[in-house]
Image: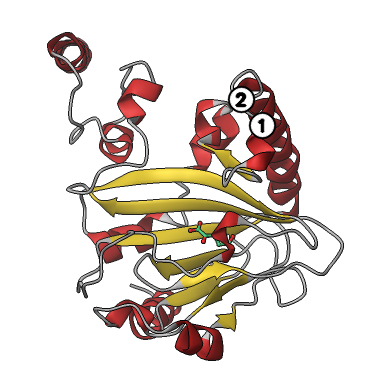
Amino acid sequence: MDTKMKKHLEELDILGYTVVEDVLTAEEVAEVKRRITDIYELQKEETAPFFDLTKTDENNIARAPYIYDDYFYRLLSHPTIMPYIKELLGDYFVLFGQNGVLVQPEEEHSMGRWHRDLSHMNFVCDPPLAINMFFCITDFNERTGATKVVPHSHKIGYPPSPEYLEKYGISVNAKAGSAFFFNAMSFHKSGTNTSGETRIGLSHMYTKYILKQQMDIPALLDYKQPDDPFMQMLLGFGSWVPNNVLNYRKVRYEAGLQKKAKANAGNAM
Ligand SMILES: O=C(O)CCC(=O)C(=O)O
């Protein structure tokens, strides 16, 4: 492991968070910004026949963008990020979810309340069960509504008082293009945006495979598992809970076909 990674993992272990700069290029950041905004607009339209998304806690959250656009699918296994997640969670882990979090100027956000990402779990876990990684798509600072984190709070097995959280919570500064990692058991919330511009983060939570995913990802992908064994693992095809016998068998059947195709390719060489 190089010294840079060592330093970040130490911060993440002790403080509960760390920022790795310059992971996405300016072009990638601009692309994500444009695409996530389009997906959020589309999701508002999809929800409109049922209710007004903007009047719910889902306001300004773009859920599972990788289902809508391959650009986001490719970011799930970003080559700079995966080695960190492997160090933290071991070789077998899954994606809990990928979500765009848009914090609008002078607007409250449902993520603006102190929380842990594994809700209702007030216990200490070492090694970690879940790591959140935000791509910062805009600058994160006190003015733009950067995430606020309470340092070391992933190490306590009970929720601190509201007074403690407010007193010791700090805004984590990160430039657009950075990867902001935090232990999912750290108390955190989105900050208040007074910058006049939308603040955008693209969250990716990775967990040990024994935890439930945010959504049934194999179902979202219509039970079509990718060829790549790493992506099969990441998306939960190796650890999901099938919702019926047929779907259980469909995934096993496809896995069998892929195995055969690989064996045949090997024989042909
Ligand atoms: O938007 C933020 O800064 C925090 C988002 C958050 O709390 C979460 O994704 O769990």
Dot 2 and dot 1 residues touching (CB under 8 Å): yes
**Residue 43 location (% of width, % of height):** 63, 28
For numbered disc 2, what is the local secondary structure?
helix
Count numbered badges in the picture. 2
Where on the image, by quarter, is ligand 1? Answer: bottom right
| Marks 2/1: CA–CA distance | 7 Å
Name the one closer to the observer, 139 or 149. 149
Which amino acid type corresponds to the residue marked 2 in the rendered image? Thr
Residue located beneath label 1 in the image: 52
Residue located beneath label 2 in the image: 47
Name the one closer to the observer, 53 or 129. 53
Quarter placement of the N terminus: bottom left
> Does the image show residue 67?
yes
Identify the residue at image location x=22%, y=15%: 258
| Residue 210 higher or lower than 178, as above or below | above
**Residue 64 location (% of width, % of height):** 50, 36
Which amino acid type corresponds to the residue marked 1 in the rendered image? Asp
Q: What is the quadrant of residue 268 in the picture?
A: top left
Identify the residue at image location x=65%, y=77%: 173
Q: What is the quadrant of residue 48 in the picture?
A: top right
Image coloring type: secondary structure
Name the one closer to the observer, 39 or 260. 39
Name the one closer to the observer, 151 or 208. 151
For numbered disc 1, what is the local secondary structure?
loop
**Residue 247 location (% of width, % of height):** 21, 13
Circle nearer the N terminus (2, 1):
2
Identify the residue at image location x=25%, y=64%: 121
Determine whether, in the image, residue 95 is placed left or right of residue 238.
right
